[in-house]
Amino acid sequence: MALKNDHYTYRVTWSEDDNEYVGLCSEFPSLSWLAETQESALQGIRNVVAEVVQDMQANNESVPEPIAVKRFSGKFMVRVPPDVHRNLALKAAEAGVSLNRLASSKLSR
């Protein structure tokens, strides 16, 4: 079974514990598929996702939107302890940049 316009985010990695490749989907973190080859692991997880999406649609459940097509604002809030906030504000002031620019720089590394 194939999902029409499949834009979900897939990854295949080696599982030492299972001695097989494991296919994963970022939008459905509870799903996985084990296989002897990378190609089989990818095809397996894509089939599982297609089945789950079909089942969710049949039950009028909300289907996760693919990360690849989501629009991001570029804003998110991060809570840190007050002393970390103070230290970052000092580093930003000493560097002559805004706290936002300093945090963005550190996060993009």
Image (spheres, rainbow, N blue to C red):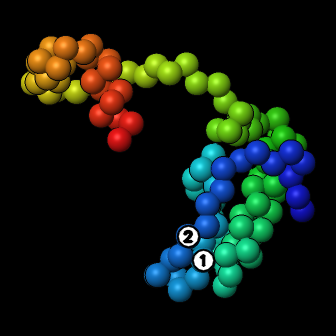
Q: Which residue lies under the disc numbered 2? A: 13
Name the residue: 66% across, 56% down: 10
- Horizontal side of residue 16 vs 62, given as left or right: left
Of all residues, the one furthest to the front in this rendering is 96
Looking at the image, which residue is at 76% across and 45% down? 7
Out of 25 and 96, give the one closest to the viewer: 96
Which SS class for mark 1? strand
**What's the residue at 82%, 56% (across, down)?**
51
Label 1 with label 2: CB-CB less than 8 Å: yes
The kind of residue on which mark 1 rests is Tyr
The residues tagged by marks 1 and 2 sit, at their Cα atoms, a distance apart of 6 Å
Residue type, mark 2 in image: Thr
Is residue 58 or residue 106 the one in the foreground? 106
Determine the residue positioned at 89% across, 62% down. 1
Q: How many labels does the image show?
A: 2
Disc 1 designates what residue? 21
Relative to 32, residue 83 above or below: above
Indicate whether 36 appears above or below 2: below
Image height of 53 relative to 82, above or below: below
Secondary structure state at the residue bearing disc 2: strand
Where in the figure is residue 8, as x and y percent of width and height?
Answer: 71, 47
Location of residue 32 (image quadrant): bottom right
